[in-house]
Amino acid sequence: MLHHSKIRWAKGYLPKPYVRRFEKTLRVTEVDPRIHFALNCGAASCPPIRFYGVDKLDDQLDLATEVFPESTVPFHNEENTVTITPLFDWYKMDFGNKRGIISFLKQYKIIPNDSYPRIQYGEYNREAELDAFAHE
């Protein structure tokens, strides 16, 4: 339970009104936004699916978090915009809203520390990755 009993369509802002005891015992107390670069849908717009080991989990999450945005999040200095994956929008609260997203992108050196760009969300592409599996 990664979203501490939040309503999915509310992007992490609203708690579920009724939570079963089973869910309460399994949910995390603090969300680690790096998890969104590890657990995902496997589509072209999402990070690749990998195996993670308990003994290396922290390092592996850092690596997944560095690699995916670095290769998919263009910063346009002239327009002062950054185009990010829809994952940031779907789990906006996990990243801490717009300021948190900007801070996150600076932390992972996707955008310069002295910038505060306008955020644009890229298109979600679920087809391409599924097509890639069909050709194997």
Image: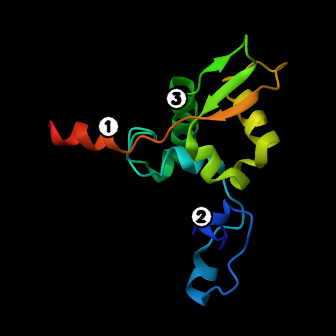
Q: Amino acid at mark 1?
A: Ala
Which residue is more in the foreground, 111 or 33? 111
Which residue sits furthest right? Answer: 114
Image coordinates for residue 135, horizontal then vertical, percent? 15, 36
Q: CA distance from mark 2 to mark 1?
A: 27 Å
Which residue type carries mark 2? Leu
Q: Are marks 2 and 3 in contact (CB under 8 Å)?
A: no
Q: Label 3: state its secondary structure.
A: helix
Colour pattern of the rendering: rainbow
Q: Quick one: label 2 or label 1, which is nearer the N terminus?
A: 2
Q: Secondary structure at mark 2?
A: loop
Position of the N terminus by quadrant: bottom right
The residue sitting at 70% across, 53% down in the picture is: 94
Q: Which residue is mark 2?
A: 2
Q: Residue at x 58, y 76 (%)?
A: 26
Q: What distance separates the C-alpha of mark 3 from that of mark 1?
A: 19 Å
Disc 2 from disc 3: Cα separation: 22 Å
Q: Are marks 3 and 1 in contact (CB under 8 Å)?
A: no
As drawn, the label of residue 128 is 1
Tell which of 57 and 104 is nearer to you.
104
Label 3 is placed on what type of residue?
A: Val
- How far across and how far down the image is residue 97, in percent? 77, 48
Residue that carries the numbered disc 3 in the rendered image: 67
Residue 107 makes an appearance in the image: no
* Above or below, 68 relative to 71: below
**Dot in front, 3 or 1:** 1
Q: Residues within 10 Å of mark 3 (few under 14, many from 20)?
A: some
Mark toward the start of the polypeptide (2 vs 3): 2
Tell me where residue 9 appears, x and y as whole percent.
61, 65
Residue at 76% across, 29% down: 118
Of discs 2 and 1, which sits in the foreground?
Answer: 1
Total tally of numbered discs in the picture: 3
